[in-house]
Amino acid sequence: MPSATDDDATEQTVTPWDVEGADGGGIDYAKLVRDFGCSTIENGMIERIERLTGTRAHPFLRRGQFFAHRELDVILNAYEKGERFYLYTGRGPSSESLHLGHLIPFHFTKWLQDAFKVPLVIQLTDDEKFLWKDLELEECERLARENAKDIIACGFDPKRTFIFSDVSYMSTPMYKNMMKIAKCVTLNQVKGIFGFTGESNIGQVGFPPTQAAPSFPDCFPHMFGESKTSLRCLIPCAIDQDPYFRMTRDVAPRIGGYKPALIESRFFPALKGENGKMSASDATSAIYVTDTPKEIKSKVNKYAFSGGQQTVEDHRRLGGNLDTDISWKWLNFFLDDDEELAKIGEEYSSGRMLSGEIKAKLIDVLTPICVGHQEARAKVTDELIDEFMSTRPRVYASLFGDMGDVAGALDEATIANAKPGVAIGAPAIEIKQKKGLLKAQTGEDGGAISKNQLKKMMKEKQKAEEKAAKAAAKAANAEGA
Amino acid sequence: MPSATDDDATEQTVTPWDVEGADGGGIDYAKLVRDFGCSTIENGMIERIERLTGTRAHPFLRRGQFFAHRELDVILNAYEKGERFYLYTGRGPSSESLHLGHLIPFHFTKWLQDAFKVPLVIQLTDDEKFLWKDLELEECERLARENAKDIIACGFDPKRTFIFSDVSYMSTPMYKNMMKIAKCVTLNQVKGIFGFTGESNIGQVGFPPTQAAPSFPDCFPHMFGESKTSLRCLIPCAIDQDPYFRMTRDVAPRIGGYKPALIESRFFPALKGENGKMSASDATSAIYVTDTPKEIKSKVNKYAFSGGQQTVEDHRRLGGNLDTDISWKWLNFFLDDDEELAKIGEEYSSGRMLSGEIKAKLIDVLTPICVGHQEARAKVTDELIDEFMSTRPRVYASLFGDMGDVAGALDEATIANAKPGVAIGAPAIEIKQKKGLLKAQTGEDGGAISKNQLKKMMKEKQKAEEKAAKAAAKAANAEGA
C-alpha cells in the first residue's frame, strides 16, 4: 500500500539512475504516482486479470509490489476482445552479481507471460551501462550475456521469448524506431525528464530512444513482422523507469504507434533497511543469487534490519514493528502462502514470534530460491542463450495462446519461402502513415478520416489479411505434412 | 587561392548546415583555415603526391579547389613507408537531383582511389537528413539508394568500394564505434562545435558520432577486419564538414584509434554568383546532373553570373573580371587542359574574349560531363548497387595496390573457412586497449610503456601476424587452385 507520509520538507528523487527518499527516508509511493501521473492498481483490476487469465494473481500483484500502471485497462480491454499484445522488459547489465531484487521483474514477467500466453522481448542495455559507468564496452557486452543466463534461469519459454543486447542486436529496424523517436524529442525535453546537464555525454543524451524503441513491435520483424501497429505492448518494470516510457507514450502517436502500457513495481528494500534500492556495490546490502546457504544465513542474521525490540522482554510486550522489519517485508515478496504469511505477521507483531525466529523463517524461504536459481543457471548452456538471442524468424501464430509447437512442425520449405528475417504469418503490411491520419489510426484522439483515406486503408487492410491468411494456410499445410 | 579579404565587420558562418560569408559576401577561406586550425596545401605537397603516386595531380588539387588539410603529411609519410590507408567520404541524401557541385568530392575521391590504389567507404547519411529535414525516414532511405546510382556513375571500383546508408548498414561494429565516440563528447562540447540549442532534437545531438565512426576501420569488418588500428583513414570532403572531424580527431586517441586525416575543398560557387554553396532547392542556382544540353545552354546563358562589362566596347577596353565571373570559375573546375584554361583567362580578362564566348566554352565543357554522367547512371543496375552495398567479406589484400582480382580467384571453401562477416586475411587481433597504453600505442604523444606491457603487445602482435600470414597463405593457395 502507498505510504501515508506526505512530508515535502525535502523532495524525493526518482530517476532511472537515482532513487532517494525525502530526508534520506523511504520512498513516498503515493506522491510518486501523483507526480508521475500514473495510476494505482486497484483490487478490481487484479480480480479482472485473474478472471481473464484464469490464473490466481502472482503474490507481487496481490500484495501490491506491482502497484501502479498506465493504461493496463486498455490492454485488458483489448485482450478481452481477443486482441494480442506482447511484453517488454529489460535490465542494465552493470554487474555479474544479481541480487534478489533484480529477479523480481523477471519472476513477475514470467508469470505474466504464462498467464496471458504472450511473447516477450527482454532488452539488455549494455550500451547504457557503458555510457554511464566506468566500464569498457566489451565488458558490458560480456555482462549482458552473463545476465542473460540469470534471466533464462527464471524459466522463460524460449519459443515465445527474445533476449537481446542493444550492442549485439543493433540493426535497421531498431535504429529506424530510435531515429523516429529521437526526432520527436528536444534537448530541453530530455533535460527536463532525465536531468541531463552540459556535462552529460551525448551518448547519454541520445540514449532514451534506445530504451523507448522496443515498445514498438516493428523493432522485431523476426518476432512480430513489420507493422508498427500489429500489437500493443505492456511493460513490467520498476517505477524508476517510468520517465523513459512517459516520453515513449508522448511520442508514440506521432510515429504511428500505440502508446505502450506499463505495470510498475516498488523498489525492493535493501537488507539493511528500506531507503530506495539495494546497491550492487555494497555486498552487505543485498542477498546475491549466487550466495550460498551459509552466506544467506549469515547475512540475514547479521544485516537484515529488524523491527524487533531491544530485549526479549520488550519484544514480548510491544511486538515487532512490521513497518520497518526487513524480514517481514522480504517474506511479503517471497513467501507464496498467504495464510502462513498472515500468521507470521500476527505472531511477530504481537511479540509471540521473536526477531531471530522471523529471520530463520526468511532464511528458510530464501535458501531454496537461491539454490534453485543457481541450479537452473548452471543448466543454461551457450546453445540455449543463442536460442533465446537468435533472430531466426518465428512463426507468428506460435507466439500467442495455446498454439503449441507450431514452429517445430514447420518444414524448411515454408520457412525458406517467407520474407527473409520476418516472422512467418505476421501482419505484414503497415498502413502508410499520413500525417493527418496518424492520430485517428492509432485511436489516440479520433481525428477525421477522409473517404479516400478510409478506402485506401480498407484496401490495404484487406491485402494484409489475405497475405496473412495465405501464410497461415501454408503453415497449417506444413504442420499437417 | 585564399581570398585576401579579411574584414571582420560581420562574422562568416561555416557549419555543416549553414554556410554564409561575412556581410553576405564570399567565404574568406584564409580566415576559415585559421579559425578551424587546419593547414593550407602547398605546392610542395602536391608535387610529393605526384611523386608518390606517379600520377599527375587532379585539376581540383592543382588549382586549389582542394586547398586545405589535416595531417595529410602523416598519411603521405606512412604511404611512403609502405603502410596502407583507406578513404572515407559521404553525402547527405536530401534530394534526388544532384547538381554539379555534389559530384566534386566524388570525382576527386575517385582520382585519389585510382592514384593511391586504396579502398574507399562512402556513407549516405539518410538518418541525418531525416533528423534535419521535413522528410519521412523511408523517403531518405529511397533517396540514399537513388544517390548511390549517381555516386557509382562517377566510376568507382566496385572491388575496392563499399557504399552504405546509415539506416541500412546500422550494425554492431558501427554502433560500437558510435557509442565509444559518444561517451567521449559532452553536450557542452557539441553545443560549441555544432551550435545545437535546447530546441534541437536529441537525434541531432546524438548524430555527430554517426558521421565520425567510419573514420575507424573496424566499423567495416567485411572490408578491413576487426582491428581499430590496422589502417589510417583519409577523408576528402568540403570544408564545412571539418567540425565533425575536428571532434573525431579529439576523440580518436581516447578510443584507441588513429586520428583521421582530411583533405578539404572550397565550396563550389553557385551559378548566380559566389556566396557560399549552391542550393538544391533553387533550380536556377545550379546545373543538375540530369539537365539536358538544352537546359545547360539556357541556364548558363541566362543565369551564370558574368564578370564581363555592360557593353562590348567597355568589355574590349576593360576586360572581364575573373574574380567574379562564374563561367571562368567553373572552367577552373571542369576544363582539364591547363594551357587552354590559361589562354581563356588571358583572352577574357584582356577583353579579347566576350562574355557570350566564355559562356559558350563553359557550355561546351559542361554538356559532355552531364551527358556522360547520365549515360553512366543509366547503366547502373540494381545488381550493381547491391554489389557496392554488399557486406560480403572482401579479400583484404585485394583492396590495395595492384593486387588484381584476388577475390574472383578465391574458391568457396576458403571463403567459407574465414570468420563470418570478416574480410579474409585482414589484420584480425586488436592489441587490447589499456587506459595507460592508449596514447603511446596510437603514437599520439608518447606515454611510457612498461616492460610487461611491451612484452604483451609484442606477443599479441606476433600472434596477429601469424594469423594474418596463415590466412594469406590460405588465400594464395586458393588462388593457385
Image (spheres, coloured by chain):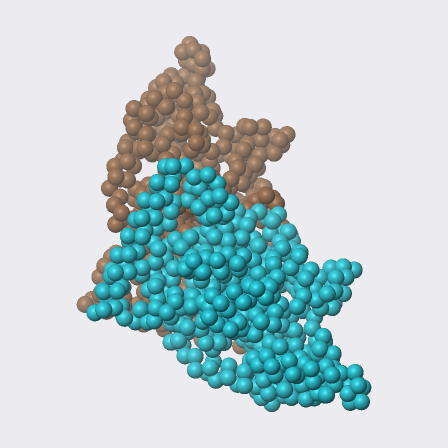
Chain colours: A cyan, B brown
Locate residue B15, reporting x and y percent. Answer: 53, 40
Looking at the image, is A340 positioned above or below residue A115?
below
Q: What x and y, as percent, mark residue B163?
A: 35, 50
The image quadrant of residue A69 is bottom right
Residue A480 visible in the displayed image: yes
Nearer the observer, B31 or A180: A180
Viewer can see residue B74: no
Q: Position of residue A376 (x, y in %)?
A: 46, 82
Quadrant of image for the C terminus of chain B = bottom left
Residue found at x 43% / y 66%:
A118
Q: Quadrant of residue B84?
A: bottom left
Front-most of residues B431 and A454? A454
The residue at the point 54 percent across, 28 percent down is B25
* Left or right placement of residue B231 versus residue B449 in this view: left
Q: Residue furthest left?
A: B481
Q: Residue at x 30, y 71 (%)?
A: A408
Instruction: Name above or below for residue B337 compared with residue B246.
Output: above
In the displayed structure, B261 sits above or below B303; it is: below
The count of marks equals: 0
From the top left corner, tell me how far across and down residue A300 is, in percent: 66, 84
Above/below status of A427 relative to B311: below
In-front residue for pair B256/A270: A270
- Residue sitting at 77 percent across and 86 percent down? A315
Q: Is residue B355 left or right of residue A243?
A: left
Toward the viewer: A268 or B284?
A: A268
